[in-house]
Image: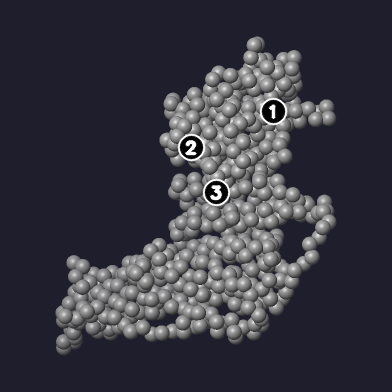
Amino acid sequence: MSTPHTFRPRYLTPPRVVLLLALLIATTARAAGTPVSVPVYLEYPLMRQLLVSQLFNTPDGTREILNDPTGCRRIVLSNPRVGAHEENVEIIASYKAQLGVEVFGSCKILLNREGDIAYLGEPVILPGAKSVKLEPRTTWITDSEGDRIASGPLWDAAVVRLVEFFGGFVLNMGPYTDSLAAFLPEVLPNLDTAQLQATINSLAISDIQVTAPSLNIAIAFEVETPAEKPESAAPLTPEELAQAEAQWQMMDALLVGAVKRYAAATELKSLHSALLDILVDSRYRLRDALTEPADRSGDAVRNWFIESWHKLNPVVREIALQQQGQEQLLWMSTLTASDALYALNQLGSTIGLEISTEGLRRLARMINAEQVDELLRYSEEVDPQLQELLREDIDNAIPDLSSWHLNFSFFASAHAAAPWEDLEQWLPAKKRLNAYVRSIEKLLESSADKAQQQQKLDQTYRDLYGKLVLATAWQESCWRQYVVINKRIEPLRSSTGDIGLMQVNETVWRGFYDLQKLRWDINYNGAAGSEILLNYLVRYALKRGEHKHSGGTANLARASYSAYNGGPGQVSRYRSAKVAAYYKKIDTLFWDKYQQVDAGKADNVAQCLGADLAGA
């Protein structure tokens, strides 16, 4: 019995030799620099699209590999599928075959058959190290019952043609290397012209790996360390500080724009949720980066930006698979650029990596060439798309703002009938501290009640949630929205940009909430903070089963506060043994306040306001 047709390997130039030759013949070759490897993950659905565009680009998506002039012999392929088979890439396609002979001018059909064919190819790097083909290793044919056909007229007619047909499939990585060649000069400004050209000339495929989900292709290049510049001991000038601020704002705007663009490209709610998680968590890390001293904040902000994009990549890659044709390739170019940034950043500061305005503009063009300026526009206005993401993520938990009387502004004309439009009544004066504490407690309880009704929070957790809101406001602001500074009433503001009663951070929640109202409307601030806490309780603490750990249901409050203070990634911080002492103290102080609220002693908040209401 015959066996499946197996081909002897045709050894092309080995990959590493190709890369070495490419480096040696570079016209501006210089001393070897630091090697950098950028992964490109070609998931098999994408490879299928590329295969179809090259080999099945007909109106009905079929392709004839045999059709003789007499019409007696015809083999048509359709419905190609691509996957992994051990160390090879496997292409399977359906076929319909009609084989016959011409007898006295008419066709006598000898065989009508359909089934599947399979082609196993080993990925090899072609000369020039910019493209990959699948060298034939094995092929087989099965009938409609799945039985293999290893000999006979169909085998004889099909096998060589199959090898020629699928052997012509080439993965051109040129668009990826070209994209990197255009991008690298924007982020390596300290390289001289010769160094930069050497880096670009060194771009080449260096390695290939077949895995179950994707064909992984590494694009390598070398970077020389630029001449070291003397560090300036002088403090940053006002102009330099303004430039640094504009730069991080542009980075944040681009990250937000990318999240909105990617969310709009998929209907999968799980991917919307993942994008929102990454954005909010990245905002917390930006908040922390901006607290670094001015002379070090540049590195911290750059690290924040690159790491945020790196976290986005797996989600974006999944969304990219839902795109068609060239659109998908554009998305993959963006992923390659961000992976290059991440790889360069791992080399440390000596490489001279900088994310310039032009570098950001190039990234924006990769995301959407028609909306570059919009993607880079930083605004403090409420963003309906961000609100919709948050609303969707907590099951429409954002309340109807029109019913919350959030029209108050310190600079607008007052409505005398409204109960809390007198700013002075929201200052904790000792002579009326009792009334002040009661008013704030009532406001917070109302905020929590409205939020949980909108969310339809399980009755089991409603009492805990109400106490969580009270304890969080105590921990964050000592139940204060305003303070007096230079005889002026101002919003309570922390050094990191936390604002008002619930200390809602302006950097983190820009676009989700109205920043002016967070500053000047105590009701709006309380509502926003309550909503954020509810989000962390429902989507993180409960979903991740924090109440199943030692400590029980009360863990839900502790976990929700850890996330509120440190971001979604910190939901289990309160029970971590490896947390820094600073954050451990924060969580301990909150837990103490929560226990007091739980014991009916929320009035103890007056102690941090300079009084004791215990006997009142």
Which quadrant is the C terminus positioned in? top right
SS at badge 3: helix
Q: Is residue 199 left or right of residue 390?
A: right
Rounded to the nearest angstrom, the CA distance separating label 1 from label 2 is 27 Å
Give the residue at x 51% y 75%.
206
Q: Indicate the position of residue 57 as horizontal and vertical percent values.
A: 40, 71
Q: Which residue carries the number 1 mark?
A: 481
From the viewer's side, name the closer residue of 288 and 332: 288
Q: Which residue carries the number 3 mark?
A: 278
Residue 118, located in which quarter of the rendered image?
bottom left
Q: Is residue 53 above or below residue 380?
A: below
Please state which amino acid type lies under the numbered disc 2: Ala
Q: Which mark is residue 546?
A: none
Q: Is residue 588 above or below residue 193?
A: above
The answer to whether residue 228 shows anywhere in this view is: yes
Residue 615, located in which quarter of the rendered image?
top right
Lower sequence index among marks 3 and 1: 3
For marks 3 and 2, give the one nearer the viewer: 2
Which quadrant is the N terminus positioned in? bottom left
Lower sequence index among marks 1 and 2: 1
Q: Which residue carries the number 2 mark?
A: 541
SS at badge 2: helix
SS at badge 1: loop
Lower sequence index among marks 3 and 2: 3
Give the residue at x 69% y 52%.
248
Give the residue at x 55% y 84%.
21
For marks 1 and 2, give the one nearer the viewer: 2
The answer to whether residue 186 shows anywhere in this view is: no
Q: Indicate the position of residue 39 as horizontal and vertical percent values.
A: 51, 66
Q: Indicate the position of residue 96 as horizontal and vertical percent values.
A: 25, 72
